[in-house]
Image (cartoon, rainbow, N blue to C red):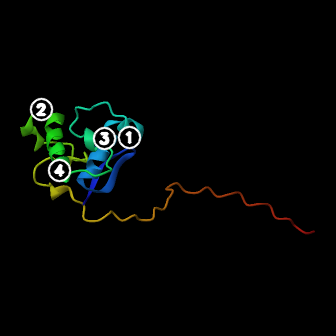
Amino acid sequence: MMMVSILGKNGPKIVHLNRRKAIRERCLNCSGWSYTDVKNCKFTDCSLFPYRSGQGKQNATARSKAILKFCPECMNGKRAEVSKCPSNDCPLFIYRKRIIDRSVNLTAFPKKHQIRTVSREKKETLPITMRKHNS
């Protein structure tokens, strides 16, 4: 498993990814992140179709071959263009070649620092309340 940044429903997300999860994420991306549409997918001629659920017993070699077949289809049938693919946020990006592209592997999750809101405007001074004078 590799830790990579991919496109998610609400923007980029960092995930641990293997081929099974990569195919699942790609199918979700294709369907607009609708689990129902992935389950009821009508694109039976897609090379990823048998692996879209990400569950059950699956042949790892067959999954790998499906990805290698899908990427040229995505690049308009041009296998030479697969190595030049600009979509590094695609879940299949690291598996697009026969050798895994480890250049996109993230070594650690970014640290989440506590965010403090600081207003640059000077706070208005509140009027001084009138004091009660004892006479």
Report the residue at 58% width, 57% height from top: 123
Which residue is tagged 3? 27
Picture quarter with the C terminus: bottom right
Neighbourhood count class around disc 3 (C-alpha, 10 Å): few under 14, some 14–19, many 20 upward: many
User: Mark 3 or mark 1, which has the lower sequence index?
Assistant: 3
Q: Is residue 93 above or below residue 32?
A: below
Q: Earlier in the sequence, mark 4 or mark 1?
A: 1
Query: Are circles 3 and 2 on residues that touch, CB within 8 Å?
Result: no
Q: What's under tag 2, amino acid-wise?
A: Gly
Q: Quadrant of the N terminus?
A: bottom left
Amino acid of disc 4: Tyr
Q: Horizontally, is 6 left or right of 68 in the view? A: right
Residue 38 pos. (x, y %): 35, 38
Q: Which mark is residue 77?
A: 2
* Disc 1 secondary structure class: loop
SS of the residue at dot 3? helix
Measured from the top left, where is residue 122 in percent x and y? 55, 57
Element type where label 2 sits in the image: loop
The residue carrying pointer 2 sits among few (fewer than 14), some (14 to 19) or many (20 or more) residues within 10 Å by Cα, namely few
Q: Look at label 3 and name its amino acid.
A: Cys
Are discs 3 and 1 less than 8 Å apart at CB? no
Please state the total of marks drawn on the protein image: 4
Q: Which residue is mark 4?
A: 95
Measure the C-alpha gap from mark 3 to mark 1. 8 Å
Residue placed under numbered mark 1 in the picture: 33
What is the C-alpha distance between the residues marked 4 and 1? 21 Å
For the residues marked 2 and 4, what is the alpha-carbon distance in whole angstroms? 17 Å
